[in-house]
Image: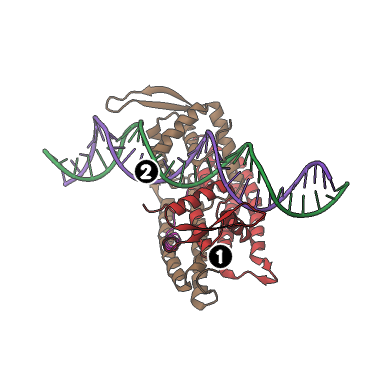
Chain colours: A brown, B red, C purple, D green
DNA sequence: TGCGGTCTAGTTACATTGCAACTAGTTTCT
DNA sequence: AGAAACTAGTTGCAATGTAACTAGACCGCA
């Protein structure tokens, strides 16, 4: 019964290395640290369900239920030794092995020829604009300070990476837009 | 009842622009055109289910069932006008709007600080090697010929894009590896 | 001619994820 | 006082992913 790995499970285990925490606290922490950019915790449904499954699998255990007057009781979870192990294993696999996750943009690209080249150009132009904004946002994040101190670089690697990739995409689109304008790249629309 | 978009659904509609086809034929075509790099058709389960749902939604219709002596009967599907419309709408949204799909590598990166910096370096070094191979494979694909003719560029945009992104990732990793070696980037392992 | 391997063409079952909506109390702002 | 936003979940269904199983056809070769 090897537990199937996922970014959500990794994030939960990873955060619990930091100390025991209750579900809502995990979600808040992910958001506070900006990790919600790389881990999907939008709907808490998945989070709660994942926590249950992790407990069943023995990777985390429920500790005392904290009782604050004004909040409903909150069960605090701890990382088990096995959980710690699994977390590091996953980390190693994820870092070493590039894996195709079928994002939608390349899939869309592979059907551009259904559109007239001018339309394709307009659409990609819009994407280019949005990418510019996104890059600016990410770069802002790289420069944010907490208590007057910049965040240490090792805690921002994923953002750095996202910038690198987004910039590469933007450059590639620029090249394509150029070739569309000059007519170097063109096609007759419709089924190949 | 707007049909939820997905790369698989897009691929099916997109391929049917080309002419009516039976399920297995769709899968084969996706593989032949190398689109299986960007559209997940590994298990046919999803494909068959998607076809059923697309038909229920009226985006495709079952035509005659082709009867070849030696094969089981194969129902041929056609694109409907609505299907054609939806396909183009999706294409426009996909091309214009960058969307976060939470790949696992950045998620992993955001927990590197749990590992000792040297280990992180080794793991990323392995990734770098595999990326090199992957890039070579993709570039080979860009240069393949069919009947002595190179494939037209507009049919290879998604591969071009994948190369651009993979190269950017490789360069970023190189920079990180450099900074790890020089000690510019470091941290003390364990929970932050 | 029989054997293994591969291709064609699916189905069944179960695990996991994602999305939407609903409950219900609390704090904060205006 | 009322509206918005936060805390802290639950329920239910739709969609996707993963594994494994069936079953006939074809292909090379020993």
Looking at this view, is A100 or C19 the one in front? C19
State the image coordinates of residue B176 (x, y, percent, origin top left): 57, 50
Q: Which residues are magenta?
A: B87-101
Chain letter of disc 1? B
Q: Is residue A165 above or below residue C30?
A: below
Distance between the Cα atoms at labels 2 and 1? Answer: 46 Å
**Neighbours of disc 2 within 10 Å: few (<14), some (14-19), many (20+):** few
Q: Is residue B6 left or right of residue B121?
A: left
Q: Considering the numbered disc 1 on the image, is that residue within a helix, a strand or a loop?
A: helix
Tell whether position B29 is magenta: no
Which is more foreground, mark 2 or mark 1?
Answer: 1
Looking at this view, is B116 or D14 the one in front? D14
Can residue A79 be seen at all in this image of the molecule? no
The part of the image, by quadrant, that contains residue A45 is top left
Chain letter of disc 2? A
**Neighbours of disc 1 within 10 Å: few (<14), some (14-19), many (20+):** many
Q: Residue at x 44, y 24 (%)?
A: A62
Q: Is residue A74 above or below residue A170?
A: above
Q: Considering the numbered disc 2 on the image, is that residue within a helix, a strand or a loop?
A: loop
Outermost residue toward the bottom? Answer: A182
Q: Is residue D6 left or right of residue A13?
A: left
Q: Residue at x 55, y 33 (%)?
A: A3
Looking at this view, is B178 or A110 the one in front? A110
Q: Residue at x 67, y 65 (%)?
A: B144
State the image coordinates of residue A74 (x, y, percent, origin top left): 36, 27
Q: Which residue is mark 2?
A: A147
Can residue B52 be seen at all in this image of the molecule? yes
Q: Is residue B71 left or right of residue B165?
A: right
Looking at this view, is B18 or A90 the one in front? B18
- Where residue B157 is drawn, which disc sits there? 1
């Amino acid at each position: 019964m090897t537990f199937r790995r996922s970014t959500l499970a990794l994030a939960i285990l990873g955060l619990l290395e930091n100390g025991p925490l209750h579900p809502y606290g995990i979600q808040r922490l992910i958001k506070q640290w900006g990790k919600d950019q790389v881990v999907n915790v939008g709907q808490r449904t998945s989070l709660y369900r994942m926590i249950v499954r992790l407990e069943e699998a023995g990777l985390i255990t429920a500790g005392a239920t904290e009782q604050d007057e004004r909040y409903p009781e909150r069960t605090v979870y701890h990382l088990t030794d096995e959980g710690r192990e699994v977390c590091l294993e996953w980390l190693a696999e994820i870092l070493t092995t590039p894996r195709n996750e079928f994002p939608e943009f390349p899939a869309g690209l592979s059907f551009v020829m259904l559109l007239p080249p001018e339309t394709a150009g307009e659409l990609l132009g819009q994407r280019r604009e949005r990418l510019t904004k996104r890059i600016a946002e990410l770069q802002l994040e790289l420069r944010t300070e907490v208590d007057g101190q910049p965040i240490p670089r090792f805690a921002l690697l994923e953002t750095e990476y996202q910038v690198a990739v987004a910039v590469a995409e933007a450059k590639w689109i620029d090249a394509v837009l150029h070739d569309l304008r000059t007519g170097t790249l063109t096609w007759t629309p419709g089924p190949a």
